[in-house]
Amino acid sequence: MAHANKGNTTTMNTLEKSRSTSSTSSDEVRVIGIDEYEQAAQCLAEAFATDDVARYFIDTDDMASYSAEYKWKLHCDILRYVVAAHCYKGLVTTIGPNYDAVALWMPPGNNMDDWWTILRSGMWRLYYKLSSEGRKRFYKEFLPLLHHTKEDILGARDSDSYYLVYLGSKPSTRGKGYAKKLVEHMTAQADRENRATYLESSAEANLGYYRKLGFAWKTDIVLERGVRPVKMQIMVREPRGAGAKGKEQSVEVRMIE
C-alpha cells in the first residue's frame, strides 16, 4: 500500500485496456476507467480507514484540533486523487458487485509524475490540503523513501516490473477471496511477460498472505517523523512459468511496445 514517486522513464509503453464484449460476472476482475474512480476510492477509504500509513499524513500534531469529520474527508480526498491518477496512467482493477475490492497498479514503464496527470487527477490539491507537518511527511519523507527503496531492491528492473500500489477490500466483504483474485489477475500477466511484481505492505500481519501468493520479503522501511515509528514491509514476487499462456480473462491487459 503506497504511492511511489518514480522518476520519468526514458521508454514509455502504450497501455491497451480491452474489455470483454460479454457480460462480466461480479466475481470477475475488471479494469475501470475514470468514470468509476470515486466508487473505487470509497472502497479504499473504507479499507484503509485505520491503517497506520494512511493516517500518518493526517494524524499530525498540527492537525490535533481538526475534527474527525475533516480528517475523514481529507483521507477520502487523498485516495480520490491517487485513484484518479492511476485511472489515467496506471491500472485500476475491481471485483464484486459494489466495488468490493480494488487494486491500483503501475505497469512497467509507467508512472504518474507528469504534470498533466497531477493536474487532472487533483493530486496537486494535496499539497494545499495537508498541514505543514503532513506535507513534510508525504513529500520529503514518504515519497523519497519509497522511490529509493524500490530502486535499490529492483535495480535495473525498477521500470520493468509491475507495482502493486494499493490493494484493499471493504471490511464487510472480506473473506470472499476478492483480493486474491485481483492479485492473481495481474501476476498472471506478469508471469506471461516474465516480469517481477513489487509491493509495500503497511501491515506486517499480511506477510503470510502475500507469501502464499508468491511474494518474498526483502526488507523493512520505517517512517520516523511521528510519535511512534511506522513500519512497512517490502516484498517482491518473481515471475513463474515465463512465457506460459494463462487462462483467458474477462479483461485483457497487453503492453504494446
Image (cartoon, grey):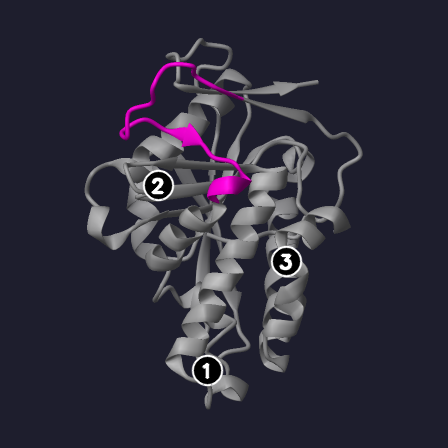
Write the residue at 37% across / 29% down.
29
- First-in-chain label (3 vs 1): 3
User: Of the numbered discs in the image, which one, if any, rests on residue 123?
Assistant: 3
- Is 21 part of what is drawn in magenta? yes
The quarter of the image holding the C terminus is top right
**The quadrant where residue 101 appears:** top left
Q: Is residue 230 visible?
A: no
Residue span colored magenta = 18-36
The amino acid at mark 2 is Tyr
Write the residue at 45% across / 28% down.
186
Q: Position of residue 175 (x, y in %)?
A: 19, 43
Q: Is 127 above or below relative to 176?
A: below
Q: Position of residue 151 (x, y in %)?
A: 65, 45
- First-in-chain label (1 vs 2): 2
- First-in-chain label (2 vs 3): 3
User: Of the numbered discs in the image, which one, if any, rests on residue 210?
Assistant: 2
Name the mark nearer the viewer: 3 or 1.
Answer: 3
- Residue 236 placement, left or right of 22: right
Q: Residue 207 or 46: which is nearer the viewer?
A: 46
* Residue neighbourhood size for the residue with mark 3, other residues' Cα within 10 Å, grouped as few (<14), some (14–19), many (≥20): many
- Residue 181 placement, left or right of 193: left
Q: Is 43 above or below relative to 48?
A: above
Q: Main secondary structure of the magenta part?
A: loop
- Residue 52 placement, left or right of 148: left
The amino acid at mark 1 is Val
